[in-house]
Image: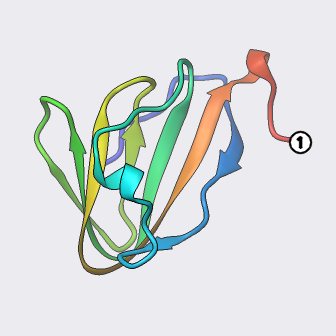
Amino acid sequence: MTTDFPAGLVKYSQSPVFTESTVPAALLKDHSTKPSVWGKLIVTKGTLIYQRVDKTAQFLKTGDAATIFPEELHHVTPQGEVEFQVEFYKPAAEGGAS
């Protein structure tokens, strides 16, 4: 499930590709992005549960993506073998990709 980003966002960074073995412990616990920072969670292999606080869990499979909202608490839970990455976006007025 994907939610469209607001107009005017630009990609400025991305995480490495994580697996069930390399996912940082911080991503497995509730955490959030900074103000004005949006994320795109992309699953390239396997299944990953994306849980936004007070929302229904999303089961993301190979090829799926989900929106990470600014400052919203969330965490992920790998389901067996998985590969995923997060792209980060912010308003163009705050500086774009270099």
- The amino acid type of the residue labelled 1 equals Ser
Residue 60 is situated, as x and y percent measured from the top left of the image, at 27, 62
Residue drawn at (29%, 54%) of the image: 76
Residue drawn at (42%, 23%) of the image: 71
Query: Height in image: 7 above or below 60?
Result: above
Residue 43 is situated, as x and y percent measured from the top left of the image, at 40, 67
Report which quarter residue 44 is drawn in: bottom left
Residue 53 falls left or right of residue 85: left
Residue 82 is situated, as x and y percent measured from the top left of the image, at 35, 77
Around disc 1, counting alpha carbons within 10 Å, would you say few (fewer than 14), some (14 to 19), or many (20 or more)? few
Residue drawn at (29%, 39%) of the image: 30
Please give the residue where the numbered disc 1 appears in the rendered image.
98
Residue 25 falls left or right of residue 49: right
Residue 77 falls left or right of residue 54: right
> What element does badge 1 sit on?
loop
Residue drawn at (81%, 25%) of the image: 95
Query: Height in image: 21 above or below 52?
Result: below
Tell which residue pokes out farthest to the front in this image: 25
Tell which residue pokes out farthest to the bottom in this image: 81
